[in-house]
Amino acid sequence: MRRSRIISCGAYLPENVMSNDDLAKIVETSNEWIEQRTGIKSRHIAAKGEATSDMATRAAQRALEKAGLTGLDIDAIILATATPDQTFPATAVTVQDNIGMKDHGFAFDIQAVCSGFIYALATADNFIKSGQIKRALVIGAERFSNIIDWTDRGTCVLFGDGAGAVILEADDTAQGTNKDSGILSTHLHSEGAHRGLLYVDGGPGTTQTTGHVRMNGKEVFRHAVTRMGEVVAEALQANNLQASDIQWLVPHQANKRIIDSMLEKLHLPPERAVITVAQHGNTSAASIPMALAAAVEDGRIRRGDLILMEAMGGGFTWAASLVRW
Ligand code: UT7
């Protein structure tokens, strides 16, 4: 049976760090409020001229180096972002050029905001399972600092910039000791009726301006806890697994309180979650691959571990995936 396996990860955070105290100089807020309500201590902000594709390329190059591969070994790039360099072409084709992926393959963007990485992973997994491609670069990259209203304390304290990437590879030997490894399943959902609760108030098809993030935080929080709980139950059931089988929860990093409530739902202790939100805030589609890269790098995630990823974002979109490392 053919499965897709994650063979390497890479992450990139811009150099410039903005602390909660820095934000308190711009809007009426405090380090205490931000940390207590969200768990965020700082966020990274891209340099002037540093585009989403630049961050995506850095993360991709790190994943390629770790796997000992070059752009020539990649068949497809699927890049999740809500902050593309331009309306078109896709940010993914710029990355394709940057990594020297020449004369073959294809690259495109996916837009599912904070659920984008799992949507991209699911897409790549299905291309691999269908036999159409052997290797995919799956990237989540965001430059939210460009679409934040820096006068709105309800949103500007939450988001940051960054990128994460994984390389997925077809494995036809998923049997014997490997039988259960790779991406076990992906589960995607959306509900357009709630698109007005978290959105950007502009775009090329309407205002012709980029617009800014607008959010009803309380409602998003409420839906996030419910919907992610549902999709996680769906993923476990589809694989005949129990919450207690999970070694690592690698969640979208929006708010530590949302992650804590998921841990509570799953009856998992706090040390089973990979939590990076304190260092970089909500980086939308980039947050899961960055958290994954951190936990693989420091040796927490090991061969055979069962990993649960889950996310929820504007749309609403929400998604989960179970992966045996
Ligand atoms: O990636 C997926 C999308 N995003 C999310 O998942 C985010 C989901 N929502 C949240 O994480 C939380 O709702 C927030 C962190 C955005 C807000 O936390 P909250 O506990 O829901 O606070 P709140 O919006 O109910 O605001 C409580 C109070 C309000 O003051 P009053 O009306 O009680 O006097 C706000 O005006 O806190 C005030 N407030 C702030 N105070 C200091 C709101 N933002 C700030 C701020 N600093 N930055």
Image (cartoon, rainbow, N blue to C red):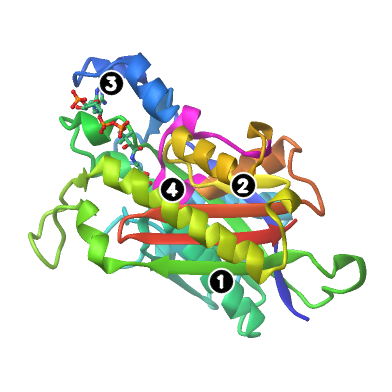
The quarter of the rendering in which ligand 1 is drawn is top left
Crowdedness near tag 3: few (<14), some (14–19) or many (≥20) residues, C-alpha within 10 Å: some
Instruction: Give how far across and how far down residue 180 sits, in percent.
Output: 80, 67
Tag 2 secondary structure: helix
Please give the residue where the numbered disc 2 appears in the rendered image.
266
Disc on the earlier residue, 1 or 2: 1
Q: Which amino acid does label 3 sit on?
A: Leu
Ligand 1 contact, mark 3 (Cβ < 8 Å): yes
Whether the magenta-drawn stretch holds residue 315 is answered as: no
Residue on which disc 3 sits: 23
Q: Residues within 10 Å of mark 2 (few under 14, many from 20)?
A: some
Q: Secondary structure beneath disc 3?
A: helix
Residue 19 appears left or right of 269: left
Residue for point 29% across, 15% down: 30
- CA distance separating discs 1 and 2: 28 Å
The kind of residue tagged 1 is Ala
Residue for point 63% across, 77% down: 128
Q: Are marks 1 and 2 in contact (CB under 8 Å)?
A: no
Write the start and end of the magenta stretch as one range: 272-287
Q: Residue 124 carries which label?
A: 1
The residue that label 4 is drawn on is 225
The amino acid sitting under disc 4 is Val
Ligand 1 contact, mark 4 (Cβ < 8 Å): no
How far apart marks 4 and 1 lie (CA) works out to 27 Å
- Can you tell which of label 4 and label 1 is closer to the viewer? 4
Residue 248 position, x and y percent, is: 68, 45
